[in-house]
Amino acid sequence: MPAELSPRHLVKRVLQIAGVIALVAIAITSLPGLNEVRDRIAGASPVWLVAIALAEVGSCAGYMLVFRSTFCPQMGWGLTYDISMAEQAANSLLPSGGAGGLALGVWALRQAGMSTLHIAQRTVAFFLVTSMANFAGVVLVGLAMFLGVLPGHGSAVLTLVPAVIAGLVLVLAWFSPRLLHRFGEPLAGPKRATWSAGVRHALRDGLAAAADGVELAKDLLRAHSLGVVVGSFAYMAFDIAALGFGFAAFGPVPPFGPLVLGYLVGQLGNLIPLPGGIGGTEGALIGVYALFNVNVTSAAAAVLAYRLFQLAIPALLGAPAFVLLRRKLADIHHRALVCAPLSADEVSSSA
């Protein structure tokens, strides 16, 4: 197991995050100038707080569904839950913008008997299908707001520009297999027992696996795989709903357009290498909503509550799954998962 995924390392991350949350709580309750934020938090509606928690559970379920549908539709639901929820817990704890969860999944699937090539291709496909939902959302909502189809005030810089950038990323990703193969062609050649030749061939194999992963993601989307489409949408939509419930708990909810677009753009703060994205994600979300003329106090209270549940729910659900997963994979009788790459017919049948 990678060192950053060891139980001791994860316990340290839990303590770090708990310390950060404690400092934030102390700051909110004691620093001057935050009276309005304190009042909003104190007057939070318990019903909406429960709704945030349930929405995050729904988001985790979407993640689990798209994980199983992408990696192995024949995988048992028990193992699916253990791996996917352990990934979610790692994403909440590690400062890697989601890469920590993928690394844990790669290790677990390899231990369970899945081939390295299969894992590499499916990991690329999984990352793409879960990311495409976000980028497609930016395109649709950004254009709709710019054209006045959706209510909400936003300049072209806040609506059209993100939509165009997201659209270009989607187009580049869709046609990337040809580019990846083209970059890999010059690296081909006779295998030699030299260090440089080994690096070239490893890089070429990596580019080929990435290209195959993109093609697999395209096949799954073309086949309208129910688990992939519904799972990736639910993973994003329930998380947006949780943030909307956070606004409802403390005050008025922003119009649909700013709520969704602010969420999608603000989540880029999670790329900052901080444990659980704490600090970067909150600052980005609050800042983006301020640009959309959302009350800063209301946004701060809503984002803090949303982020607390977004980190806590996957961690609470994923920690026991992580322990069970280690025990299962330590038992030789449970290390028998064989899930060969699916053919085009099998992809269609899993839709």
Image: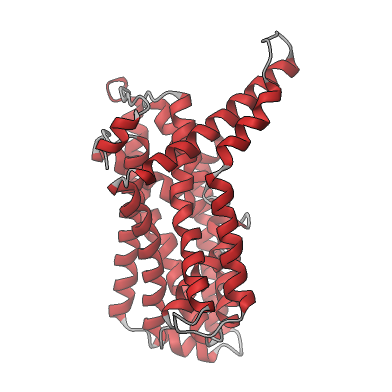
Q: Position of residue 152 (x, y in %)?
A: 49, 84
Q: Position of residue 16 (x, y in %)?
A: 55, 57
Residue 216 as seen in the image, left or right of residue 195: left
Name the residue nearer the viewer: 23 or 49. 49
* Image point (45%, 31%), residue name: 119
* Image point (27%, 43%), residue name: 351
Name the residue nearer the viewer: 335 or 11. 335
Residue furthest top as drawn: 193
The correct choice, above or below, for 225 with respect to 15 in the image is above
Name the residue nearer the viewer: 154 or 181. 181
Q: How is the image coloured?
A: secondary structure
Q: Is residue 279 visible?
A: no
Quarter of the figure with residue 157 = bottom right
The correct choice, above or below, for 267 with respect to 4 in the image is below
Quarter of the figure with residue 19 = bottom right
Residue 95 as seen in the image, left or right of residue 10: right
Q: Is residue 62 visible?
A: yes
The correct choice, above or below, for 350 with respect to 336 in the image is below
